Amino acid sequence: MTYADRLHPLTVFLWYLAILVLTMTATSPAALLPLFVSAVLLRGVQIGAKRLLAGVPLALLLLLSVTAINLFLVHRGAKILFFLNGKPVTLEAGLAGVSSGVMILSVILFCSCLARSLPGDRLLSLFARRLPRLALLLRMTLGFIPRLRLRYREITDARGALGLADERGVIRKIRARLSDLSILTTLMLEESMDQADGMRARGYGLPGATRAVTEPKTFRDGLLAGALVLLLVPALYPLFSGRGEWNWYPLDTAALLPDLPLALCYAAGTAIAVLPIFLEGKETLKWHILRSRI
Amino acid sequence: MAYLTLSDLTFAYQGAASPALAGCSLSVGEGEFLLVVGRSGCGKTTLLRCLKPALAPHGVTAGDVALGGTSIGDLSPRDAATLIGFVGQDPERQTVCDTVFAEIAFGLEAVGVEGTLIPGRVAEAADFLGIAHLASRKICELSGGEKQLVNLASALALRPRLLLLDEPVTRLDPPAKLRFLSAVRRVNEEAGVTVILAGHDTEELFPVVDRVVYMDAGRIVSALPPRAFVKEAAGEALSFLPTVPRVFRLANGTGEPPLSVREGRLWLTGTLGGKAVTEPDGTDDATAKDDALKTQELLSARDVWFRYGRNEPDVVANLSCTLSPGEILSVVGPNGAGKTTLLKLLAGILCPFAGTVRYEGKRGLPKPGRDGIAYLPQNPALLFARDTVREELREMTGGTPDGDERIERMSARLYLDGILDAHPYDISGGEQTRLALAKLLLLSPRVLLLDEPTAGLDPIAKKQLRDLLRELAKSGCGVVLATHDLTFAAVISDRVATFFRATLASSSDVRRFFSGNRFYTTQAVRLTRDLLPVSLTADEAVAVLKERAGGAT
């Protein structure tokens, strides 16, 4: 049970949507860095330091490759580090690469946080009302995939045991696999007929279908939605006013520190990302305290 | 006052030579519980489907079906969906959604129940059937029995007044079967829902139902209360009698026919007039036979361990077993215990994590193919890749010169000669099992591994399978059956083993196994225990009774 579980999925979804938009549009280091730190902290609160650290090598690899790609493909910038094949390799290109890498990492981290805060079925229930057909399709697919994999396994096992799969030669092997796939298709078609019966038997396709209301909105949702709107206005200001525009080529070190109004806007954006850390962290802490008292 | 009335209902599938239903007339009172029996393909499923407009098969219909005085054709689609609930045979195939809650809510949403009321309706249905704790589980993680209860709950959530159940428990193991059937009984008794159930599970249902409808070749031959059905049954209908009434009929019992084991024992006590025998039966013989069989070894497993993932529990742990030539070994136990895994280990499909599987005394298994080990999966359709039965058989003979001749012989032996040009998906379940067996037998296997071969077979198809397996065993083929059909295990096996806690908990001669068990045994044993020399099957009990009657006169 996390804090997000007690909120309406729409609140959680909108909150993360705001964070993702802010992260993806953050170009200046002053805006991006606090968001990245929040992403790391939030994920850490969710899954613990140990599992977070386990992901470091992969993150470093991603960061390095994005930096390297930018470094060797973009040749703009004033501070030339060295020449490669007669082309300049610049400090700015390297920094811009690191910045993009950090942005991508932050987005990945926030997305995994979202997936944890809003598991598949809750996310789906969000769309069910607006897009009932799509939601049903998704639900059916989610139910279908494990069955499909199981059936394929059963088919290859059963035919393999008859010696029908162990054919020598590439062509024969391909033919054996195609046979397996053809059985799978026929079986699944047969099963879909039964499934369609199951749907029709329960009145699927009648006009006036409804959706189950399983998650009522609460006062807490209203409070958080209000806070989100209040914070979003300043947080989005740099994006829409053009003031937050950042250019790495050439690097203007004086602009790295924003002026006060811009800093306040970034602070609002950071606050949106920090609040979930606070709420989830408080939850974890509460459990620890409760447990120590028991 | 009849609630459901069938007047001269006739139905023919498009292009079929003979009608699937011919002049069926029946009137069912509100709250009645009907059991429909008959051979596979006799029209049971067609009859049930004709009662539910959304599922009515395509074809030519004549006659009328009325529900509560209204012809079902005139019911609004919404009423037809809510008033008539339907649960089919395969628990896997009817589910639509990924979670239990969504599945039960599916029908309520479709018929337009107000969104805020749905959770309550789902909870009501789930609670009534005792599956409320499953509500947030994923469907794919449930057992077959649980899935079928979810299917029943989805039908019940719509508050039907008529519930149609088409062989709902054929794929379930005995405990799950009992759980499902007692749930159906509660629906009938406590909620007054009219129930029509088609199936071969007569042992559990005869004592419960109001009437037994016997169908043959699309006709309703009789629709009688169970005791009357027992008295009147003749010819083929006799094979649909459960063990206790069957013994009563075949032993020419007099008076009211018993339906349950309790009634059967009372009747037996009365008939025997206090001359009950309590001597244990043939245990010493059994031991001797056991030892004789052990001398030869065709296939064996020694201290085998297996699990599907490193961090998953052991599915097979420290298991040892042997199979001799010509021996039939039945492995019984609940679904999901690991019976299928054991068969796959013996077939070489899975590789033991520790321990060895030996074939003819040597480590390792022969390559799949001729003269080796053949494995029949629970769903025989997994093996079918061609368009006709003949092509299916040809797939096994390849281009060998005597191939066609062997196919002819095999199809005659397995009664497939009439359907050689049919599509493998268009034949009945029993025929599918025989076709899959024919494919296996064309490889002349020395060991046959069969996974639930009797699921969905009618009593007559079971008898054919029994004769075939006996014949194979006589020719030296070793057979391992994984089954939860105890009656079948009792008639066919030389040895029986229980799969429990990832290993074979007990393995003994069939007679010792079933006579030693009090509950996990056949109805015939429960009927005759302490009254007659223990009989494993109805026929055996009848023979004993006749012998005594002969001896007495």
Image (cartoon, helix red, strand yellow):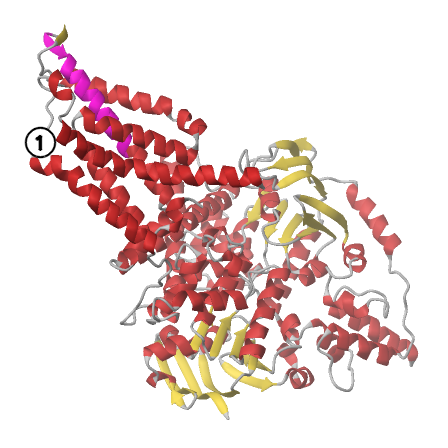
Task: State whether the magenta stretch is mostly helix, strand or loop.
Answer: helix
- Is A278 on the left-hand or right-hand side of B488? left
Pick the residue in front: A294 or B410: A294
Q: Is residue A133 magenta?
A: no
> In x, y percent, where is residue B118?
39, 67
Q: Is residue A28 above or below residue B30?
A: above
Say if B435 sits above or below B243 in the image: above
Q: Residue at x 28, y 29 (%)?
A: A36
- Image position of B284 with respect to B502: above or below: below
The residues colored magenta run A86-107
Spot occupied by residue A235 in the image (x, y as percentages of width and height) = 18, 38
Kind of residue at badge 1: Arg
Residue that sits furthest to the bottom in the current view? B1
Residue B421 visible in this rendered orientation of the protein: no
The question of residue A103 being in magenta is answered with: yes
Q: Closer to the camera, B90 or B20?
A: B90
Secondary structure under the numbered disc 1 in the rendered image: loop
Apparent side of residue A43 relative to residue B395 in the rendered image (left or right): left
In front: B441, or B99?
A: B99
- Residue visible at 62% across and 65% down? B178
The spot of residue A202 in percent (x, y) is 39, 70
Quadrant (top left, top right, bottom left, bottom right) of the C terminus of chain B = bottom right
The residue under label 1 is A243
